Image: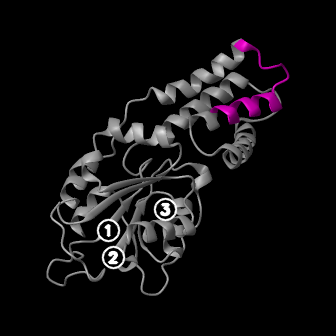
């Protein structure tokens, strides 16, 4: 990488770009590649399979959200956690036991996610390649370590990152830990992602800048009102990742 030391996150009046040498931390799921749409398909299949006679689809989904929150707290993120949430929800709402056959059917919904090819969002590869020439790029995601590193390998994007961090959770303390671990300068460090709850608000709280790139199908458990940037910090909102190449 062609790296230049950056002293601030101030745009050049001549080019409209930030100085070379910024540290850009990229989220993965639904920022670099599609992810939640596959979970939504699995959930739709699960709700249809459950075929509850009293609860509406929306009410079943709300119960599943409740189970997902509880399972994540106990087991963390990932496909195994999601599968357990589906089973727990089925056991709570179904009037019949989870037979081995029904269990296999539920597992098949999750397996379809695992077998899904990586679908990069438009402009991702080209933008990362361009940004990596002048900036320090890291992947900062959360979830199951093996699942996330496997997705990165299959994406073909690994060569653009100076480092990869798979966190158990993204909260201000986690971002502060990354700053300390890698000696990032908060004045020139940006978190880029689609999730207000995990990418934007906690990174701003940790003293970093942020770039919010909304995704139409961001997971409902990641929804949150986007906070304003504190003094001396920046919050940008873009329509697509390709726009990053115009400002960095």
CA separation in Å, label 2 and label 1: 6 Å
Q: Is residue 22 magenta?
A: no
- Please say if the residues under marks 1 and 3 sit with CB atoms less than 8 Å apart: no
- Please say if the residues under marks 2 and 1 sit with CB atoms less than 8 Å apart: yes
Q: Is residue 99 magenta?
A: yes
Residue 25 x/y as whole percent: 37, 62
CA separation in Å, label 1 and label 3: 15 Å
Q: With 184 as the anchor, is 175 left or right in this view? A: right
> Who comes first in sequence, dot 1 or dot 3?
1
Q: Residue at x 59, y 44 (%)?
A: 77
Q: Residue at x 22, y 76 (%)?
A: 5
Residue position marked by numbered label 1 in the rendering: 23
How many neighbours does mark 3 have within 10 angstroms: few (below 14), some (14-19), or many (20 or more)? many
Q: With 184 as the anchor, is 89 left or right in this view? A: right
Q: Which mark is residue 188?
A: 2
Residue 184 x/y as whole percent: 37, 72
Residue position marked by numbered label 3 in the rendering: 199
Indicate whether 141 appears above or below 113. below
């Amino acid at each position: 990488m062609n790296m230049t030391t950056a002293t601030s996150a101030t745009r050049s009046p001549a080019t409209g770009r930030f100085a070379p040498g910024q540290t850009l931390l990229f989220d993965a799921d639904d920022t670099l590649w599609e992810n939640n749409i596959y979970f939504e398909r699995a959930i739709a299949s699960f709700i249809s399979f459950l075929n509850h006679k009293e609860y509406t689809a929306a009410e079943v989904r709300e119960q599943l959200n409740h189970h997902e929150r509880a399972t994540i707290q106990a087991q963390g993120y990932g496909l195994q956690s999601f599968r357990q949430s589906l089973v727990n929800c089925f056991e709570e709402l179904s009037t019949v036991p989870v037979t081995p056959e029904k269990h296999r059917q539920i597992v098949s919904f999750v397996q379809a996610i695992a077998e899904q090819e990586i679908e990069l969002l438009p402009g991702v590869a080209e933008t990362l390649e361009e940004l990596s020439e002048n900036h320090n790029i890291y992947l900062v995601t959360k979830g199951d370590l093996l699942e996330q590193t496997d997705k990165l390998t299959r994406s073909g994007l690994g060569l653009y990152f100076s480092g990869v961090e798979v966190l158990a959770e993204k909260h201000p303390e986690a971002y502060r830990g990354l700053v300390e671990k890698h000696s990032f300068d908060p004045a020139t460090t940006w978190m880029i992602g689609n999730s207000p709850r995990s990418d934007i608000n906690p990174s701003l709280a940790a003293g970093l800048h942020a770039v919010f790139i909304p995704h139409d199908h961001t997971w409902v458990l990641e929804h949150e009102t986007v906070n304003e940037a504190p003094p001396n910090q920046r919050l940008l909102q873009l329509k697509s990742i390709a726009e990053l190449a115009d400002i960095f």
